[in-house]
Amino acid sequence: MYSWCFEQCDEALHIKIDGEVHGEVKSVKIGKKLTTIKVILASKEELVLSVNLFDDNGSDICRSMTPLKRSKVEPFCVSRTKFAERWNKFVSNGDSEEGRSSSSSGIESDDDRNSSYSDHQRSPCTQSDVPISTSTDGSKRKEGNSITGIQDRTLRDNFLGTFDVHVNNLIAPHPSRATRTIYHEHVGSLTDSFKENDNGQLVIMIGMLTCQDIRTENLQKDGSTKIEILGGNHTRQALQSLNQRGVLTCQLVKVNLYRPLPLTAALAIGYQHNALLHEKRKPLSFIDKVRLMRQCRPAHNMSKTQLNEWKDMLVTIFRAKDRRKMMAGYQQHMHMARLSDEIWTKVLRATEKVTAVNEKFFRPLMRIDEDEKIKECLDILMEDGTKVFQKKVKQYIDEGCVKSKKTKQTEQPNVETPNEREDSIVLKRKYLTLKEKHSSLLHEFEQIAEENKRLKEELENIKAAAESKGKKRVRDSDDANEFHVGEKIEAFWKDADGESWLLAKVVRLNKNDARVQYEVDSGIANVPFSWLRKVSK
């Protein structure tokens, strides 16, 4: 085993093992074992090292940082959590000095959101790298193997950084990549809020290059390029409206920029932006989520393979744990997303006339088993309103026109054919055989239950006898002042040959016991006060 330490070289933290520099450190984590630390290098190599072998004086940087206080209890000779926090903080401080960005997912923290506008007013943002993950080993393995993990790596690999972009260079997303349609009322409320409070941009938008050869240094020039906005489309339209009126105080906006992304990745980052940000946002409605699911369908009539691919895409976009969790939370959405284009068009027209449409509103409709009946109900909804619509849907459900297994069937007279009669005789014989076997098993079970009860009682008696025996030999604890050093007493002794009270001399008095020396063999042992007594006369 070799000693190891950290060393600062060229403003970067390196690890030195047995006096030789091994590589640049990117992060420090707690290892699986109680005394290990895991060091992640820039080359993605992982080193598992014993914290007990860390050399506090191995380098200038280790000597300058006060060594952590070591515990008196082994094997926790050093607090691993504080150790990892201290050196990770040192690494992160070094990264921040080099201008590295702390946000690559497109969803900024509270501090980022609070400072976004002030930073936006001060200086342009430079290109940033994707930060190193600080996840645990388990989550790292899951990330590598799961669909969500692959999608996260795609986003990290294509992330360019946070840039200042001229507001006129922003364009609406392609219809296939739009997570929802534009709500003009929401745009109006954002415009009024920006104008009244002079806050400008409240959150960083998510953008994607429309082609690979766009130069990022030209983003601040009006008309130099086009950036497709995947998240923050309402904010884009509100800011452009203010700019057209000539009342926008700053024409540069913050955008987390990505290279051209696959459809699933573009929808995923757009959905996360709309679902997780809470400042002046309009939540995605039930219809918005269904529309988003329909956009990523591989085909209108999906095969079993295509259906599974579609579910995997939805797991990625909606950040569900797996397909089962996705079905549990969005089953109604997925049923509506598989409707034909004709029915879906009727749904959209109906929702324009009916307010407060949610998942619960369409749940009874989706139980109907025939498309023609669903169309009829939607036509009634558009023409006659919700009450007549709900009455018609209930009528079809009562008639048994549903997909449920509880479909009502008309009763028919039970007329047995000769073959059915033969099968009935065979089944009766089989039933009688199984019934006889069941009775035999019940009898065996009763016998086993009685034996089990008897054994339990016997075990309780053995325990009670052992406890009573222990109480006889162990006397009540007396005050330590009852004995004094050098006094001859009798100490209880127990070994394989039996148990007895032996003569002994008190050597030292402790808090809960006494150290005694037996006369029979001069042996020394710590004995509880309850096992000591005065010499019997």
Image (cartoon, rainbow, N blue to C red):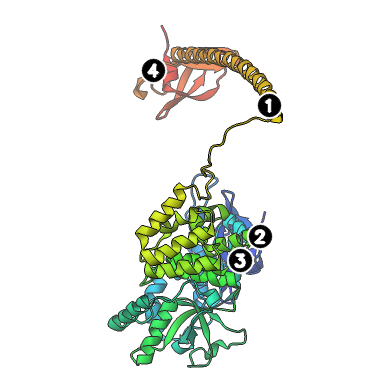
Which residue type does callout 2 highlight? Ser
N-term mark: 4 or 2: 2
* 496 relative to 13, above or below: above
- Provide the residue designation for mark 2: 303
- Provide the residue designation for mark 4: 476
Q: Residue at x 49, y 81 (%)?
A: 172
N-term mark: 1 or 4: 1
Real-space Cα separation, disc 3 to disc 4, in angstroms:
84 Å
Q: Nearer the viewer, mark 3 or mark 4?
A: 3
Q: Residues within 10 Å of mark 3 (few under 14, many from 20)?
A: few
Residue 225: horizontal and vertical position, in percent?
Answer: 54, 89
Quarter of the figure with the N terminus: bottom right
Which residue type does callout 1 highlight? Arg
478 vs 311, left or right, is left
Which residue type does callout 3 highlight? His
Q: Residue at x 54, y 63 (%)?
A: 339
Q: Nearer the viewer, mark 4 or mark 2?
A: 2
* 363 relative to 433, above or below: below
* 291 relative to 367, above or below: below
Real-space Cα separation, disc 1 to disc 4, in angstroms:
82 Å
Toward which corner of the image does residue 249 lie, by quadrant? Answer: bottom left
Callouts 1 and 3 close, C-beta under 8 Å: no
- Provide the residue designation for mark 1: 421
Which residue type does callout 4 highlight? Asp
Q: Residue at x 67, y 19 (%)?
A: 433
Q: Secondary structure at mark 4?
A: loop
Residue 83: horizontal and vertical position, in percent?
Answer: 51, 58
Real-space Cα separation, disc 4 to disc 2, in angstroms:
79 Å
- Provide the residue designation for mark 3: 300
N-term mark: 2 or 1: 2
Callouts 1 and 4 close, C-beta under 8 Å: no
Q: Nearer the viewer, mark 1 or mark 3?
A: 1
